[in-house]
Amino acid sequence: MTSSAPHLYEASTRTDLLDWGVQSDAIEGVSRSTGLLVHKGPDNRPETGIWVCSEGRWRLSIPRDELCYFVAGRATYRSDSGETVEVREGTAVMFPAGWTGECTVHEAIRNTYILAADDSEGSEPKIATPVMQSPLKLTDLVDWGVIPTMIKGESCTSGKLLHKGPGGRSECGLWVCTAGTWNCHVTRDEYCHFLEGRSTYVHESGEVIEIVPDTLAFFPQDWKGVCTVHETIKKIYMIR
């Protein structure tokens, strides 16, 4: 049965990845990609999954906002404007639409990602590339209040924004939620990589989705159900 919210477990370690071929536009070496899709919408918009890439150096162009959470490896991204972004395990990066440059993979990298649906191909990025290092070590979180649709308990939320575009587009960052049960209505497509905690999402159809650490999930717009947070959850997210 197709899940109401496509998801997979052990995103950082699973080995059932598919061969996605050699990275195009190579500059040095031969980087090969593997991966696994969680969701792909019409015309690939949005697209969410796991991506792994071996050592090498190559050019790239990112047509739409893309959030990547790196769980392994080490790489350097250099934009044509001269910006340098260093990534390693525990780095979240939101590459803005129109980003062009090159990537040097020093040690094979693995990330989970969402490539947003908005088509901005050909545009120039209007912001510096937002980067968040070691989200689980952050202490300067902002109080985002109690979930307003509580059924039982009082789930308090907090977090830190990585980026928020015009009209809330491509909002992403770290989100934390304490124990409790509440009605959940996802008003826009959302990518989630759960880092800590345990929760249960029950869709209005009756489908039960158990969330544990290292679960990657895609909740489509208008997903409705009930969420019970058993142990405080922390997740990297993007709402497109």
Image (cartoon, rainbow, N blue to C red):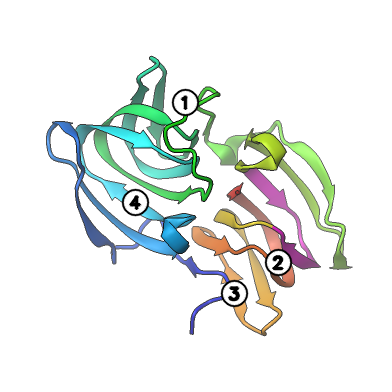
Instruction: Examine the structure image and report whether residue 179 is included in the region drawn in magenta.
Output: yes
* SS at mark 4 in the image: strand
For the residues labelled 3 and 2, say whether their Cβ atoms are less than 8 Å apart.
no
For marks 2 and 1, give the one nearer the viewer. 1
For marks 1 and 4, give the one nearer the viewer. 1
Which amino acid does the dot numbered 1 rest on?
Answer: Glu
* The disc label shown at residue 51, or none: 4
Instruction: Examine the structure image and report whether residue 202 is included in the region drawn in magenta.
Output: no
Q: Quadrant of residue 143?
A: top right
Q: Nearer the viewer, residue 37 or 152?
A: 37
Q: Position of residue 109 (x, y in %)?
A: 31, 42
Question: Over which residues does the magenta segment extend?
Answer: 173-187
Q: Mark 2 to mark 4: distance in Å?
A: 30 Å
Q: Evaluate whether residue 149 shows in this view.
A: yes
Which amino acid does the dot numbered 2 rest on?
Answer: His
* The disc label shown at residue 209, or none: 3
Dominant SS type (magenta): strand
* SS at mark 2 in the image: strand
